[in-house]
């Protein structure tokens, strides 16, 4: 009888465990809690309320965020806004909105989502440090409409087996000037439409990087109008549609070149400087040297003295 009770109790526990397990499977895996927005920002000197958005006004605003911005949107709205994020931009966005805005961000750091900066309409100035995405999440800078000036640090992807990059910079519409650090590990720059100037520090120095001018008469060169060195990795430079000027050279030579250039008018090769001639020109004709000097005439011999005349007698 005791054995029968133990058997029934064991069967009951087993059945209860099976029911709990089945219910867990039916409910699916537990979802992680949504990350909360985090920021410490001021709008025109007034601390912004907690929440997912920090909004400017229809006029000219100054928005300053003193630390990292995480899971939030910073939006300038209308007017010529000045937005500065002193920390990292983590899974967040900075939007200039309409107007000639100045946007300054420390680093774009995607973790579980994307991190981006957008100038919006107007002639914007965008300054960021590192633009480094991952294989799954992007770090992106957009100039959007207008003649924008974009200055960034290195534009990179994620190091790994495939060197797949989520770091990108887009000029979009307008005559944009884009200056960046190293473009590598799958990083990419696209000028967009109209006549753009693109000046990276290097392309594909370690792995691979892409620079594309897009439609328009674009200029691709090194920083401060220097010669851009591409490679020794798989660098790609494509001027795109239009009459483009590229001031660059491959790092490697001969069969070791892995970088490529397309739709670019390269500057004519400078002929090697001609070495100055080392032949000594003939000396000017000199008058013939005078012959040997004639010997001096021997000194005249002294004539013998004449005897004295005898005195006459008295």
Image (spheres, rainbow, N blue to C red):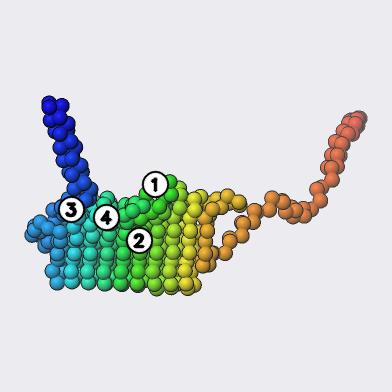
What separation in Å lies between label 3 and label 1 (alpha carbons)?
28 Å
Left or right: 72 with respect to 222? Answer: left
> Which label lies toward us, 3 or 1?
3
* Real-space Cα separation, disc 1 to disc 4, in angstroms: 18 Å
> Residue 201's x, y, as percent?
41, 54
- Point out the frontmost of discs 2 and 4: 4
| Res 169 label | 2
In depth, the one of 227 and 134 nearer the eye is 134
Please say if 247 is above or below 311: below
| Residue occupying the point 44% across, 64% down | 212
Residue 34, disc? 3
Q: Residue at x 18, y 57 (%)?
A: 72
Residue 29: give x, y in percent of width and height. 23, 48
For disc 1, the marked residue is 159
Q: Which mark sits nearer the N-terminus, 3 or 4?
A: 3
* Nearest to viewer (mark 3 / mark 2): 3
Residue under label 4: 113
Mark nearest the camera among 1 and 2 is 1
* Earlier sequence position, callout 3 versus callout 2: 3
Quote the CA–CA distance across marks 3 and 2.
29 Å
Left or right, 15 with respect to 266, comes to left
Q: Of label 2 and label 4, which has the lower sequence position?
A: 4
Where disc 3 sits, the SS reads loop
Q: Are marks 3 and 2 in contact (CB under 8 Å)?
A: no
Question: Is the residue marked by circle 1 packed among few (<14), some (14-19), or many (20+) residues within 10 Å?
Answer: some
First-in-chain label (3 vs 1)? 3
- Give the SS element for disc 4: loop
């Amino acid at each position: 009888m005791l054995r029968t009770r133990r058997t029934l109790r064991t069967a009951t526990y087993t059945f209860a465990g099976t029911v709990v397990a089945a219910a867990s499977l039916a409910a699916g895996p537990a979802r992680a809690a949504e990350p909360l927005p985090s920021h410490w920002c001021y709008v025109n000197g007034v601390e912004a309320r907690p929440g997912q958005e920090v909004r400017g006004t229809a006029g000219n605003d100054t928005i300053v965020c003193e630390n990292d911005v995480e899971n939030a949107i910073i939006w300038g709205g209308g007017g010529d806004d000045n937005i500065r994020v002193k920390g990292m931009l983590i899974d967040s966005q900075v939007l200039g909105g309409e107007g000639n805005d100045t946007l300054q961000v420390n680093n774009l750091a995607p973790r579980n989502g994307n991190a981006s900066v957008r100038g919006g309409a107007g002639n914007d100035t965008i300054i960021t440090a590192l633009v480094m995405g991952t294989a799954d999440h992007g770090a992106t800078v957009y100039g959007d409409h207008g003649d924008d000036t974009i200055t960034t640090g290195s534009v990179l992807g994620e190091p790994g087996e495939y060197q797949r990059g989520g770091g990108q910079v887009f000029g979009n519409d307008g005559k944009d000037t884009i200056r960046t650090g190293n473009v590598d590990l799958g990083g990419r720059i696209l000028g967009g439409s109209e006549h753009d100037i693109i000046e990276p520090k290097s392309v594909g120095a370690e792995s691979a990087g892409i620079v594309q001018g897009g439609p328009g008469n674009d200029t691709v060169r090194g920083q401060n109008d220097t010669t851009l060195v591409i490679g020794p990795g798989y660098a790609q430079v494509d001027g795109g549609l239009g009459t483009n000027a590229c001031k660059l050279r491959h790092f490697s030579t001969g069969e070791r070149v892995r970088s490529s250039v397309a739709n670019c008018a390269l500057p004519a090769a400078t002929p090697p400087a001609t070495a100055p001639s080392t032949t000594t020109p003939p000396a000017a004709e000199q008058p013939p040297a005078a012959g040997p000097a004639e010997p001096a005439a021997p000194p005249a011999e002294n004539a013998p003295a004449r005897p004295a005349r005898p005195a006459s007698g008295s």
